């Protein structure tokens, strides 16, 4: 993530900044094993920017042995390539797809 990363998720306030993202996700990772499968539908690279759009399937497995839950969501992200060539997420948006 870039230091100024901004992520919007369905039904939640925006997460602004790398530290805000870390703080928001820390309790989640303390309680769940997280496995993500991503189907990329589109990838556009223009210089030091990349745009990616696809479908995430996020599997949450409780560390306490409870039932696993799979959540599907659409995702759109903007990445930035830094001077050292490393790609980092800088913007992101996700929302729930229509019910199947």
Image: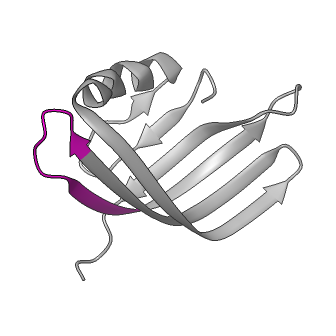
Reply above or below: 44 against 68.
below
Residue at the (58%, 64%) spot, across then down: 53
Q: Quadrant of the N terminus?
A: top right
- Left or right of residue 73: residue 49: right
Count of number-bearing discs: 0
What is the magenta range? Answer: 61-73
Q: Residue furthest bottom?
A: 100
Q: Nearer the viewer, residue 34 or 89?
A: 34
Q: Quadrant of the C terminus?
A: bottom left
- Please say which color scheme the image uses: one colour
Position of residue 42 measured from the top left corner of the image (x, y, whole percent): 66, 70
Position of residue 93 measured from the top left corner of the image (x, y, whole percent): 46, 51
Residue at the (13%, 40%) spot, across then down: 65
Residue at the (64%, 48%) spot, across then down: 78
Residue 8 lies within the magenta run: no
Position of residue 16 measured from the top left corner of the image (x, y, whole percent): 45, 27
Quarter where residue 57 is shown: bottom left
Q: Nearer the viewer, residue 64 or 99?
A: 64
Residue at the (50%, 34%) spot, across then down: 6
Position of residue 97 measured from the top left corner of the image (x, y, whole percent): 33, 71
- Left or right of residue 99: residue 18: right
């Amino acid at each position: 993530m870039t230091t100024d990363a901004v992520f919007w998720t369905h039904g939640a306030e925006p997460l602004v900044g790398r530290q805000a993202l870390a703080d928001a996700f820390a309790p989640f990772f303390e309680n769940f094993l997280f496995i993500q499968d991503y189907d990329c539908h589109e990838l556009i690279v223009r210089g030091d920017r990349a745009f990616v759009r696809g479908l995430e399937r996020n599997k949450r497995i409780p560390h306490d042995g409870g039932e696993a839950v799979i959540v599907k969501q659409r995702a759109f992200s903007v990445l930035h390539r830094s001077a050292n060539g490393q790609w980092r997420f800088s913007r992101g948006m996700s929302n729930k797809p229509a019910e199947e």
